[in-house]
Amino acid sequence: MSLELLKIAESVAKAAGAHLMNRPATFTFTEKSSAVDFATQMDQQAEQIIVSQILKARPDDGIIAEEGASKESKTGITWVIDPLDGTVNYLYGLPGWNVSIAAKDKSGVVAGVVYAPSINGFWSAAKGNGAFYNGVKIKCNDPVELDKALLATGFAYDLNLRISQGETMAKLLPKIRDLRRNGAAAVDLCYVAMGALDGYFEASLKEWDHAAGGLIATEAGAVVSGPAGGVPSTQLVMCAGPALHAQLLPLI
């Protein structure tokens, strides 16, 4: 079943990614939690493409999607969709934005795809079958010592939370190799999966931000801790190889 779901996710992600590569000259904006948290017409169009194609293939499945699409599942399978992860990168013409699609059952995520066409990156995983980058099997870096670790993070839209995040950065920076802020959670998780990063952490993620990337990282040998669906979004998601994860946990 997970491989069948993965094939659908791969096909649909490619269709949405191809649409998003036609970046418009002008944008329309829909504000969400704040003036800097918004969706564009391209987020909404990509979601429409993804949802319509999934439901055409599996009309009784459920849907949870960032831009509002929602449907109860009659099959036990629910799709968790971020049609454009890294909207700010997309708006500014920066790379790394992506399409993130996961399928879950009552046990958790069983298939996931992250497609970042601006960097020719296609990551995929089915539960129990390993993780892949552009068709090649991948593994996370492990073991990695803290002082040699290249980490990535992101910052919350909530200004009060940003203050505490800045304090955490100040304590952490002298202890690590360096820090990156790439702007797209799903790709950061996939970078850990393939060893392009040693670890990643971020607060205030939603389920659609980490569902697909979290499975890909786990299947690549990383430890992913943090919220599942329904847990308050201010909780931290942390991803790293087992040795580094244990070192980071008390520091963040």
Image (cartoon, helix red, strand yellow):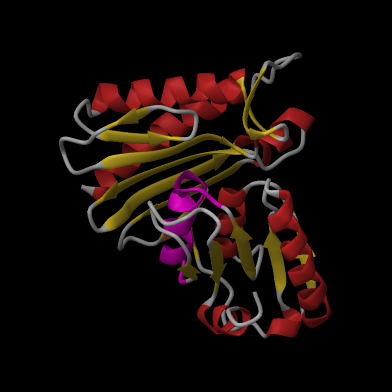
Residue 231 visible (yes or no): yes
Q: Residue furthest left?
A: 74
Residue appearing at x 35%, y 23% in the figure: 53
Q: Is residue 59 above or below residue 173?
A: above
Circle count: 0
Image spot of residue 167 (x, y percent): 78, 69
Q: Position of residue 118 (x, y in %)?
A: 67, 36
Specify whether residue 188 is painted magenta.
no
Q: Residue at 38% of width from left, 62% of height from top?
A: 130
Give the residue drawn at x 66%, y 80%.
Answer: 251
Say left or right for 194 vs 212.
right
The part of the image, by quadrant, that contains residue 39 is top right
Of 38 and 48, the residue lying toward us: 38
Which x, y percent locates residue 151?
70, 67
- In screen coordinates, is 102 left or right of 74? right
- Is residue 215 on the magenta stretch? yes
On the picture, is 191 further left or further right than 58? right
User: Observer-nearest residue: 244 or 248?
Assistant: 248
Q: Nearer the viewer, residue 5 or 154?
A: 154
- Classified by dominant secondary structure, the portion drawn in magenta counts as helix
Q: Is residue 218 above or below residue 125?
A: below
Which image quadrant for residue 97?
top right
Please provide percent x and percent y for residue 85.
58, 39
Farthest front residue in view: 160
Query: Is residue 177 in view from this perspective?
Result: no
Quarter occupied by the C terminus: bottom right
- Magenta segment range? 205-221
